[in-house]
Image (tube, rainbow, N blue to C red):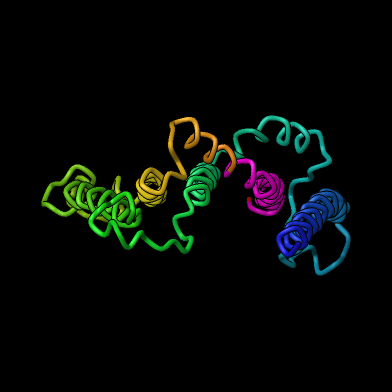
Amino acid sequence: MAGTESNRKWRQAVAMAAAALLVAQVLLALASWLLLSIRNSQLSIANCQLSIFNCHRSLLSGQGVRWLAAHFVDGLQSPLLVWLLLAAAAAGIVRRSRLFSVRRPDANSQLSIVNHPRSASLILLAVYVLIVLLLTAPPHAVLLSATGHLWPSPFSQALVPIVCLGAVVAAIGYGLAARTLTTLTSIVDAAAEGLRGAAPLLLLYILAMQFYLSLHYVFVQ
């Protein structure tokens, strides 16, 4: 019951946030048209020198409509979207594996990794961390920049995917040992479940990114 109530509140919060972003987008379009009209009519409101009136583009003009149509898809293509998708898929696998659940090992089989799934998880995670260190720690490592720096570098650019992959490796190691993830199909289903759970966030991302880009178009010259 508590989970259902929490889920209902989460959906309501997402719906309210989505509605707020939609209203903000409409208000921005109207404000851009109004401010541009004020500027073009050369009204004596501080000679339009206030920063709020430094508006040279309207979303409701022909140019603005063309910009919305031409840049809608391009504007959504950002690393943040990829990070969100990767994190959602990784979270789905971690959740399905029950990596953070409380599970007591069998006292009669203390030496068996199968009965200590966290041991299997930690072993795989340690191997993964070692591989990452070998790709970043030595001088002139593969993931360092051309000048040998860690930031910025290919490693820093791929930091979120690296972290997500590490979480997936640990979860799969635990899931295989604990029998919560037994097949490739179960792993793929878990990732898909994570993506489905992140669908509200993807909707908010689309609305928020479009509002941000519209603000940039209207006010940034």
Q: Residue at x 88, y 52 (%)?
A: 41
Q: Is residue 22 above or below residue 46?
A: above
Residue 49 relative to residue 151: left or right: right
Q: Residue at x 41, y 63 (%)?
A: 104
Q: Residue at x 76, y 35 (%)?
A: 63
Q: Residue 5: x and y, percent?
A: 77, 62
Residue 212 relative to residue 45: left or right: left
Is any atom of residue 174 visible in this view?
yes
Q: Residue at x 84, y 41 (%)?
A: 60
| Rendered-image quadrant of the N terminus | bottom right
Please check the rendered image and state whether residue 117 is part of the magenta-colored stretch, yes or no.
no
Q: Residue 71: x and y, percent?
A: 65, 34
Residue 91 relative to residue 26: left or right: left
Magenta residue span: 194-220
Is any atom of residue 40 visible in this view?
no
Please check the rendered image and state whether residue 204 is part of the magenta-colored stretch, yes or no.
yes
Observer-nearest residue: 174 or 211? 174
Q: Main secondary structure of the magenta part?
A: helix
Residue extending farthest to the left is: 139
Q: Is residue 213 above or below residue 119?
A: above
Observer-nearest residue: 101 or 160? 101
Residue extending farthest to the front is: 108
Residue 50 relative to residue 163: left or right: right
**How many numbered discs sit on the rendered protein?**
0
Q: Residue 106: x and y, percent?
A: 35, 59
Q: Residue 111: x and y, percent?
A: 23, 56
